[in-house]
Amino acid sequence: MSTSAAASATAAWTTLPSVNPRRSSSALRLPSSLRRSLPSRLLSSSPSRSPLVPVSAMASPAAGETASRKKLIIFDVEEDLAASLAKYTAELSAKFAADLAAFTVVLSGGSLVKALRKLAEPPYLEAVDWSKWHVFWVDERVVPKDHADSNYKLASDEFLSKVPIPADQVYAINDALSSEGAADDYETRSKQLVKDGVIETSTVTGFPKFDLMLMGMGPDGHIASLFPGHPVVNENQKWVTFVKDSPKPPPERITFTFPVINSSAHIALVVTGAGKAGAVHKALSGGQKTSDLLPVEMVSLQDGELTWFTDKPAVSMLSSI
């Protein structure tokens, strides 16, 4: 992304409105000490052409549905995407940490974790209030925590071990349980954290409302461990469910369900590479049939904002870009 484009994109984050009337309505801002340490190109508010593309091509909600707020940002290079994602996350952290006692963050696996690397570097490493972070996983493979396929291990090795989040505020699955048992346990623990006031409840849906979900998307349009055509995409009662026959190995997983995902305050969906262009095209070009939705198309926040962080190869099939 060009310098001018990066400046315009980042300036847009400082004016995102609050999505919860119980929270402060002030704009999202980094602490002044952190803003002073950021490169000027990420703080400029010059009126250059913005890479923020309104996702107007997405299907309009049906009558009675709540419209979610959506944005699409396209970057020339991954380095700029990572820089923008770090600033976006740090601003949300500052806002929620100031308003509440906790900042609830949900991670996925895969390339998303690498995209978070700049949060573990100056100026964010020193300026973010990591003591307020509570970290969850949108999905996890049912393997030991030290297994190469573990999303926990990936996040720990690449991100969590480099930032001072209290260990008891990182909520990994119980890897001693079966997939069904691990899902039930994760839901039970999440419900207790709602009772404890760590996680909010959506006044719209009644499901837990996490402050920020950071997710990727597979080439087939799957998110979390919600795969196209799999029965778990239709689960609408449980908070956490299990999968024993994932089409992508390993086969056994647990995952947050769509009612939980769609109750989030913010979702950052990081999607890069030409291999995902087909799914991006289907998700953003409009005209899709409800009987043939990809899981990524089923992300529709009830009272929140969805932001796509993408690159040019990922949106190469979109004729309107």
Image (cartoon, rainbow, N blue to C red):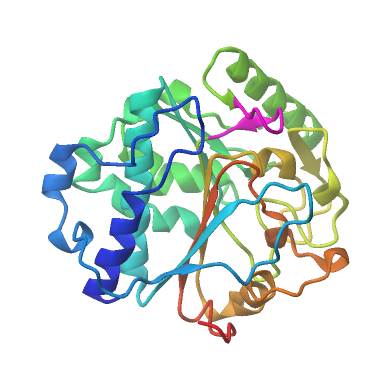
Tell me if I can see residue 83 in this picture: no
Question: In which image quadrant can residue 44 be found?
Answer: bottom left
Residue 315: percent from left, percent from top: 53, 78
> Magenta residues: mostly which secondary structure?
loop
Residue at screen point 49% across, 48% down: 154
Instruction: Answer left or right for 182 relative to 317.
Output: right
Residue 242: percent from left, percent from top: 79, 40
Residue at screen point 17% across, 46% down: 35
Q: How many marks?
A: 0
Residue at screen point 50% across, 29% down: 21
Asked whether residue 43 is drawn in magenta, I would say no
For the magenta stretch, what is the residue range? 201-210
* Residue 223, above or below 236: below
Observer-nearest residue: 305 or 133? 305
Residue 41: percent from left, percent from top: 18, 64
Instruction: Answer left or right for 197 relative to 252.
Output: left
* Residue 298, above or below 278: above
Q: Which residue lies furthest to the top in this view?
A: 196
Asked whether residue 208 is drawn in magenta, I would say yes
Instruction: Answer left or right for 59 relative to 126.
Output: right
Instruction: Answer left or right for 129 relative to 182.
Output: left
Observer-nearest residue: 131 or 180? 131
Residue at screen point 27% across, 36% down: 128
